[in-house]
Every structure is written in structure tokens, then in C-alpha cells.
Image (spheres, rainbow, N blue to C red):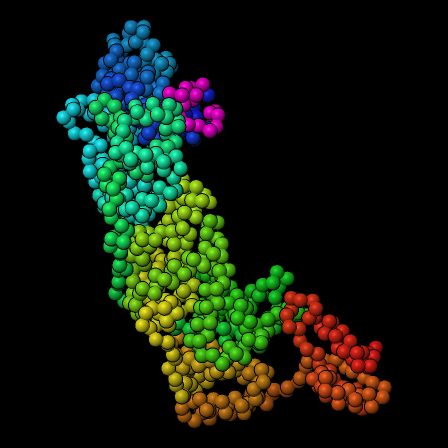
Amino acid sequence: MRTLVSYLNQKRPQELKSFAELWEANLTDRLSNGNTFQLAQEMQSEFLQRRLLEKLNEDDLTLLAFFTTQSTSGLSQEDLLQKFKLNEIGPSLLRLRQLGLLYEDKIKAENSQITTPNLPLIEPPAERRIWDRSYSLSSNDSTTDLKTTLLLPRELIHSLRRLVAEKQASNAITEEGLEISRLPLQQLLERLEPELLESLAPAWGLVGLQGSTSANELAAELILSLSDSALQANVLSQLPEDSQDFFARLKQEGGRTTLLNLRKEFVNLKRLARSLQPLTKHLLVWEAFELGGSVVFIPPEIATPTSTLADRPTLTLQTTTLPINPTVYPPYTLAWDSLTFLNYIGQNEVALTAQQYIPKRHVKKLSSLLWINKRSDEALRFEFLTELYKKLNLYKTELSTGRLQPSLGLDEWLRLDLYEQTRRLFEVWKKTPQLNTCINYPSYYNSHAAITQSNEAILGWLSACQPGIWYSFASLLRKVQRENPFFIRSRRELINQFGLAQVEEFGLTWNQVEGEIIRWTLELILEWLGVVMVSLDAQDRMESFALTDLGAELVGVPGVTRQSLPLNEKPLLVQPNFEIMLFGPRVDLLWILLKFTNLKKLDQVSLYTLDQASVLRGMESGLSATMLLEWLARNNPQPLPQNLVVSVQDWSKGFRRVMVERTILLEVEDPRVLDELLQTKQYAAYFVRRLSPTAAVVKLAEPKNSFFAENSPDESLKLFKNRLKNNGFFAT
């Protein structure tokens, strides 16, 4: 079965124009083939459907009601003649087609040999013309394996079924009969289709109930929303001013009038529709067929709202049992990784590529040393941590070589414990929306303000949790959908930018957009930062989460004290097989250990190993064999294994240290000039050593920022020469 737009696109422009006039559709574009979307939207409007039904007689309504209850494959000539007589339905068939309600379609017949029965009812020429114009049958159709049917487009079936039944009932009701406009709001909502109730959910802040609750439950929530004065005023404020004025005037006039009176007042049906339709679409104003006419009314529960949103019970997060596969690494892993990263770039020539990326070979080596979450994309986490460390000024890029090196912030960083480092990382993330690139924000949320608002909202929800308690992620999504679906940007703000219709479409994809933003903020970033632990289901999707003790402190859980790491006086155990077990997560310990060992395993108790290459690497970074052994002995609870001591001493014998640095040679003709320079206080910091009576080594200051040309080495030399010249020493 094709869509209504598809059927309309098969019509000639003149037929489309006729449909639009008969429906009194409010169109902004000229109709043509392939340009019928707006007409189809207008034809799905309940307001215009009611106006159309007012034009139909009882025979038309009876036939239309029959079509609304039939299969979506349509009705053939034979099907209709089993229920009706042709001379009774012929005019109605033609009228319904002329109104754009019925359309011709072809379906595959069960029997490939189709024969049109010789029906006496269609023998008279006038009746034959009616039938032919209704079905457009030709003589060669009898030999095909397709049969022609008439059908009502699926977009019109549900609403017309209800409206036709209401119209037929109103024609039969006497003055003592039941009036729809007097029904309680609960019964009015029960008359609507479940699909219609779900489509109304976003407008009334009930996105979370879409597709996850029964029609009765959704109707009950809608009653609370519709009868809430604050929410009602909020929805009204988002409608056109004409609709707001109409609603206020109707309330003043008792909340009830007839459509006939309104048509006299508005004269033009299109003007009336512009004021009334937004209200009926949001269920603030209702319309019903009553006593042979149409009544427009405001249900009493809406006209006199009493309840408030504050009276609604809030949803609680569902707790779960301890999962089988929770996060297994400690909350300070990102801080730990900072020491690994900074050690690595200090011991290796890591120069950025022309595109300003760390070369892949180094990324691969570094990734093997980090607490990488294997379930997520390693590249995402690596980019996240390097950007964080750059924001903290922990490393810099050397101007002349493009090499990464530890920066001025390193000394202070090493004086902090791993928990304090993690706090710093968390605060930098909160203040830097650009660090959320691993999460897919759509264009309407991709701003610094929106991302910051999203993060703050999620941290606010976590502050209501207790550390160590596991919560169902699905229950969190349900709670947010129901209580705060517009947690990133307010509904009013979105409507101002995109319009009401577009915002309601956003609501239909809430689980795929906002729900996934919540998921990945928890499962990636907040797990990386040590705020939460997560567990995954069989499809590797997060099913539950729990706050860590440190995370509870970071998000501000009431009553949580400042966390501290346990102290361990002897945090190492050096074994004869050259393995070193690390028990205590101490920054000073880990920083030195990384310089002369190889990582074997990261865990609650991490394992490192010694070999000749690692010892020589440590000596290259400034350690001697004696310093290395003394350091191990101080932190080991027992004497060092003798074989390890001998091996380290043997390995160190092949180490020959050579000092290499970039300097400037300063020469003078007269030794007295050099004597004067060395004795001048303002030049003392430049001189490294005197090589001879007329020569000395000068070292200039390193550039403060590699991105500014004025701090380049050439510029530093120029500044030094100018300083000499200002005091009467002319450099050539």
C-alpha cells in the first residue's frame, strides 16, 4: 500500500487543485505532480476531515465507514457487490473519489486468470459510466494477473474511522442522548487512538512514555499535564498569538460554542483553522459532532486547572545486584597514564607529523602502556587524555624540531598525589566543552553552552546516587525522559530556533540522540575520569553504573568526605626473577619506576620488569647504577636479591655518558672584555663556562611558546646581541 503523497502524485494538477478547494486546504505552494506533501499534511488534519464529513450524506458515511474497517489492500468490484448494490453506492463512490478519499490501486490476484463477472447491476449505461469512472477499468484488464481495487490511504484510516462513527452516532442521538462535549477528560482521551496519544507526548513533556507504556497510562499522564496550570501556560505560550486569544475568549464565554457561530465570526475557514487547529492539535480545545452539528469546547479539567507538576511522584532509579563484569581498574587511571605519557615523551624522540599528529608507531607503543579500556575506541581515549594534559600545560612542542617534551607544569604535577591529579583532570574537563569530541552531538546541540549544560545535568543526576550502589541505566533514561527530556537546551529555546513542528520531530528520536549522549558521557568520559564504574550486557552496551568513592566526591554527593589514598611505607617488592610488584599508587614512586623498568601488567597490583635495555634507558635519563639500587633498597621491605644487584652493576659498565646541548660560542679579542662580561650581573645567567681567556659558552633562554615567532631561537640570539650593544659591547 502506497502513501497518500504517492497517490496524490499520480493525479493531474487540475485534480489536485479540485481536492484542495473541496478540502479548503491552507496551502502556501502551487500544486503540481511531485509537490503534494503539504496537501497530504492538510488532508490528515482532523479539523479539515471534520469539515469534509459535514458535506457527506448518510450513504456516503456508510460507504466510507465500510472502507475504514477493511484490509489495507483495498476492495475490488466483487468485494463491494457482495455488500452493496451498485445503484445504491455508485454516486457515493464517485463522490468519495472526487473528494480525494478513495484511490485506485492494483494488487496481485490469487488466481492469475481474472474474469470480471457479468453483473446485471452494471448493465444500464448510466450505471456503467459511474462504475467505469470509479474504477477506470478497461477491456484488457480481464487478461492480467492484477486486479483493480479501491482503498482509503492508511494515513486517513484511523482518524476517519473514529470521526465517521462519531458523525453517524451524532445524527442518531436525540436531545436526551449522550453529548461528547460533556464527557470527562479521561473518557475523551480513551476515544483517541494510541498512536495519536503518543504523538502528543513530546508537546506535554512526556517523551519518556512513548512506546514504553500503555495507552491508559499515557492518558493518565496527559490528564495531569493538561490540567496543570504552569505546564498549560507554557504550552500555550508556544502557540500563535491568535490561538492564545481564541483560547482566552472561549474560556470567558463558558468554554463552549458551535462551529456555525465561529464560521460566522471568522467568515473564512482558513482564518478559523489558523486559530483553532494549534489548540485542537495540543488537546487544549476539542471538537465533536453533536445534534447534527459541530461543537467546539474546552473540557472542564482544562478550563479550570488544579494540579501542579510538583504533585507528581518522581521516578526513582532502579538498583541492581553486583554485575559480573564491572569496571576493574581504579578511578585514578587517567592520572596514572599522565605519568606514563610524560615519561615516554621525555625518553623518546616523539615529533609531530606535518598534520600535527603523534606518529602512529608512538601511539601504538604508548597505548600498550596505558590503562586503555579495551571496549572503547583506543584512539578516542588517547586523544582525550593528550588534550587534557595539554590543557594542564604538562607538555609542550619544541619549536625547531616539533618534538614533544614535558613542560613547566610537570614539577607541580609531580607534587600532587593521584587523587589530586584526577581532581584537576575532572575540573579541566568540566570547563572545556571541546574535550567531548568522542560524543556525537547533533548540530542543534553542538555548542559550548549546550555541551556544558548537558554535562552539568548528568553530574547533577549522579549527585543523587550513592557510591558503590549499582543502578540500572534503563531506569535513568526513563526518569530523564519523563522528568527532564530537554536537559541540554530548553524546549522554548529550541522552538524559537527551529519551530514547534521540528522540535516535536526531535522528540521522536530522543533515545537515539539524547539517550546516546547520556550513555556515552557515562560509559566513556566519566568512566575514564574515574567518576563511575559501568557494566555491559551481552551486546557490549552499558546496562548499569555505580559511583566510585572519588566520583561521589567529584559530583558533590551530600555527606561525602574528601577521599585520600592509603599510605604504604614499603610499596614495592623486588623479586629475584627481576620482577617488581607495585602495591601502592604513589606518584613519586611510579615516576621513578617508569624510567628504568618495562611494564608487564597493569592491575590492582601492577607488575614491572628489569632488563639491560631498561636499566640503560634509566641511566640515560640521569640515574646511575648506584642511585637506582639505593632507590630500590629504600622502597623494598627486604634486602635486594643479590643476582639483581650484580646484574644491574654489570649492565651499567657499558654505559658511556655524553652531554649534548645547543649553545652559543662567544669569543673576544681582549681577555679583559670577557672578564668584564663575566663580572657584569646582568649577563651572569647567560654564561655556562669559560673555555679560554678569550672564549666562553653561552646558553640562551628556551622559547616560552613554540607557536609564536618572537620566541624563536633566532629571535633570542637577536635580543642577546641587542642587550650587549646597549651596554657598549658590539657583537659581530
Q: Residue at x 31, y 44 (%)?
A: 232
Q: Is residue 296 left or right of residue 579?
A: left
Question: Where in the figure is residue 41, as x and y percent of width and height?
Answer: 39, 31
Please, is residue 429 above or below residue 695 in the view? above
Question: Where in the figure is residue 172, as x and y percent of width and height?
Answer: 18, 22
Please, is residue 40 above or below residue 361 in the view? above
Q: Residue at x 45, y 64 (%)?
A: 430
Q: Residue at x 32, y 17 (%)?
A: 95
Along the line of sight, which residue is nearer the eye, 378 or 51? Answer: 51
Question: Where in the figure is residue 446, as x and y percent of width and height?
Answer: 48, 53
Please, is residue 619 above or below residue 195 in the view? below
Q: Residue furthest top?
A: 125
Q: Is residue 484 left or right of residue 185?
A: right
Q: Residue at x 45, y 18 (%)?
A: 14
Q: Which residues are magenta?
A: 14-34
Q: Magenta span has 94?
A: no
Please, is residue 310 above or below residue 651 in the view? above
The answer to whether any part of residue 232 appears in the image is yes
Along the line of sight, which residue is nearer the eye, 530 or 299? Answer: 299
Q: Residue furthest left?
A: 176
Q: Magenta span has 22?
A: yes
Along the line of sight, which residue is nearer the eye, 110 or 104? Answer: 104
The quarter of the image holding the C terminus is bottom right
Q: Is residue 242 left or right of residue 403?
A: left
Q: Quadrant of residue 59?
A: top left
Total labels: the figure holds 0
Q: Residue furthest front?
A: 252
The quarter of the image holding the N terminus is top left
The answer to whether any part of residue 509 appears in the image is no
Question: Where in the figure is residue 448, as x and y percent of width and height?
Answer: 49, 57
